[in-house]
Image (cartoon, rainbow, N blue to C red):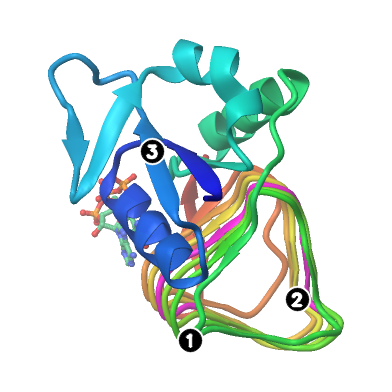
Amino acid sequence: MNRLAILGASGHGKVVADAAALCGWEHIDFFDDGLPERKVCGVWSIVGDSAQLLAAVDTYDGVIVAIGNNAIRRAKQQQLVQAGAVMATIIHPAAVVSKHAHLGAGSVVFATAVINPFCEIGDGAILNTGCSVDHDCSLGAFVHVSPGARLAGQVQVGDESWVGIGASVRQLTCIGARVTVGAGAVVVSAVANDLTVVGVPARAIGK
Ligand SMILES: CC(C)(COP(=O)(O)OP(=O)(O)OC[C@H]1O[C@@H](n2cnc3c(N)ncnc32)[C@H](O)[C@@H]1OP(=O)(O)O)[C@@H](O)C(=O)NCCC(=O)NCCS
């Protein structure tokens, strides 16, 4: 029986577990620092905290970090890899990922997301429900593209950036690192590192 460990017993974690079960993971355990108060996440058991997972990575065939915060997800994945974890990549069976796209380790792609050819996507990405990432996009490590967000062709997104729910990004646009694109925004020009942008067209509201 193949065994998957998920770090982060969140709502997002439940969606990761559900997709993982659909794509063939037979035994799924959660780990979360909310122990001992919390013992279950949906129908799955929380069997330990993050320190216990670090000590037990070699007993799992795959490990994935289900933490929405991009910087925290990156730090946790790095610790796990250093401890010898094999990072899983979970692609929901109802997602469409081109065989000519590349996805980094520890990434998840949820139902009805479409990742078109020649996309390069870094480690630990969250490509959320119904998002689309069009041809030749380049996404850094630990990026999150929220539900229903759309990236047109040849968009670049830097490490740890978050594209909010329902946002759209015009083709060829460069979005820097650690950027937040607000829900529903339409990004039509480059966004510098560390900014938060909102609205149509998207404008910066701060760092
Ligand atoms: C952009 C965002 C991160 C800002 O959050 P915040 O820092 O808490 O900002 P606030 O809610 O205090 O809003 C600050 C101002 O920006 C405006 N604003 C916030 N988000 C906005 C958005 N998406 N579009 C337009 N305006 C927005 C607010 O109306 C407010 O304006 P005001 O100062 O005139 O009242 C957040 O609103 C957002 O859009 N998050 C994305 C959520 C998402 O995608 N969730 C999916 C998870 S899977």
State the residue position of label 1.
Answer: 94
Find residue 27 and report its horizontal and vertical position in percent: 42, 48
Residue extending furthest toward the left: 37
Asked if residue 164 can be seen in this view, the reply is no
Find residue 67 and report its horizontal and vertical position in percent: 44, 40
Inspect the image, locate mark 3, and give the three-letter code of the amino acid beneath it.
Asp
Characterize the magenta stretch by its predominant secondary structure.
loop
Residue extending furthest toward the front: 1
Asked if residue 95 can be seen in this view, the reply is yes
Inspect the image, locate mark 2, and give the three-letter code of the amino acid beneath it.
Val
Find numbered disc 3 in the image and state the secondary structure of the residue it sits on.
strand
Whether label 3 lies within 8 Å of ligand 1 gets the answer: no
State the residue position of label 2.
Answer: 155
**How far apart are labels 3 and 1 at the CA level?**
23 Å
Nearer mark to the viewer, of 2 and 1: 1
Mark 2 or mark 1: whose residue is earlier in sequence = 1
Inspect the image, locate mark 1, and give the three-letter code of the amino acid beneath it.
Ala
Would residue 145 be counted in the magenta stretch? yes
